[in-house]
Amino acid sequence: MKPVAFKNRYFKRIKNSNHLMSLDEIANEHLKTINSSWDFHIDDRHDFSDISQENIEKFIKKVEKNLSKSFSDDPMTILRKYELIKEDKLTFEAYLLFTSNNSPITSLQIGRFKDSVTIIDIIDINTNIFDQVELVLDGIRKHLMTEFIITGEAQRTVKYDYPLEAIREVVINMIVHRDYRDSGNSIIKIFDDRIEFFNPGKLYDDITVEKLQRGNYSSRIRNRAIANAFKEAGIIEKYGSGIQRIKNECKFHGVIGPTFEEFVHGFRVTLYKEKIKKKENEGVKQLFKLVQTQPNNRSTYFAQKLNTSVKNIERWLKQLKEENKIEFRGVPKTGGYWSVDE
């Protein structure tokens, strides 16, 4: 439902009540009516001396690689085609993508906390937003725990205590969807048991935390020009798929799912280190008792006794082995399962 003006005030209907709109909300609604977003518009505070030719060339190479084609035009013509330059002036998007200086507008802080007040390390990253992605990921990685997994291959597999792909997705979402008109910083806090990602700017348009959790929402993009540049460069794969990808990566990694919280001036995503607790179903309990009372038997025997499939038995045996409750003794043809305590 569109906003309604009354005595120089703008209201919009939310459920059963009228909501007085802020200046930002009014501006956003105006931009939507002209099918635009603020980052498409000219940035009068910055000019070409504030951006880097090297950063422009890096962007063009990323786009060429992602689209598998080469541009024949000169860089300035390419930027005009992508509407990064208008009326021979920079847009807000162009400044954020290609800035050559440390910019307070892009400032993103990473803090390693021992508790809520004790800071072990702090990093301030205020580069152009393209370089920021990998710099932020490097800053987070240095504070994560790792383990080496022997796979039989020549190289060992490194496993982090958090799902890196979920972290990457959160970081990209922070940078692309941040409200750069807000003076607040983006802040990442790394604790012993969790990582908190806070971004200035509430959820955009009619998206709510409840809709995010249910997956019942359509993609709404605050910074359409920035999102398009990230997509052209291959950093974003598909609009609106990030939240589900974060959830899937957490589940695949074996840790509990993320939480989403909205505040007056921002939005926070939290990833956790805590492992998913495996539910011990009744079949697993019965199988463990059977192994204890009738050891040195195999999956086919247990399947007959419990009147279930061999596939189910093998899955339950795997769980019991992972929990260090049972072990296989003897050679494959004649051995069987035993309780570890026996």
Image: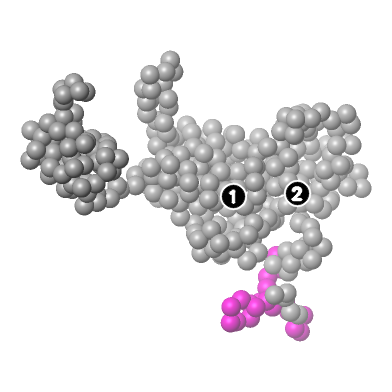
| Percent coordinates x, y for residue 56 in the rendering | 78, 33
* Mark pair 1, 2: CA separation: 18 Å
Residue to which mark 2 is pinned: 225
Asked if residue 11 lies in the magenta stretch, the reply is yes
Q: Secondary structure at mark 1?
A: loop
Residue 59 found in image quarter? top right
Q: Quadrant of the C terminus?
A: top left
Colour basis: one colour
Q: Which residues are magenta?
A: 6-24
Viewer-proximal residue among 289 and 304: 304
- Camera-nearest residue between 42 and 222: 222
The image shows residue 282 at horizontal and vertical percentages of: 21, 52
Callout 2 secondary element: helix
Tag of residue 334: none
Q: Is residue 124 visible?
A: yes
Q: Quadrant of residue 144?
A: top left
Q: Mark on residue 241?
A: 1
Q: Is residue 127 visible?
A: no
Residue type at numbered disc 1:
Ser
Contact flag, marks 1 and 2 (Cβ < 8 Å): no
Between residue 209 and residue 69, name the one nearer to us.
Answer: 69
Callout 1: few (<14), some (14-19), or many (20+) C-alpha neighbours within 10 Å? Answer: some
Q: Is the residue 35 above or below the residue 58 in the image?
A: below
Q: Residue at x 82, y 53 (%)?
A: 41
In terms of image quadrants, where is residue 287?
Answer: top left
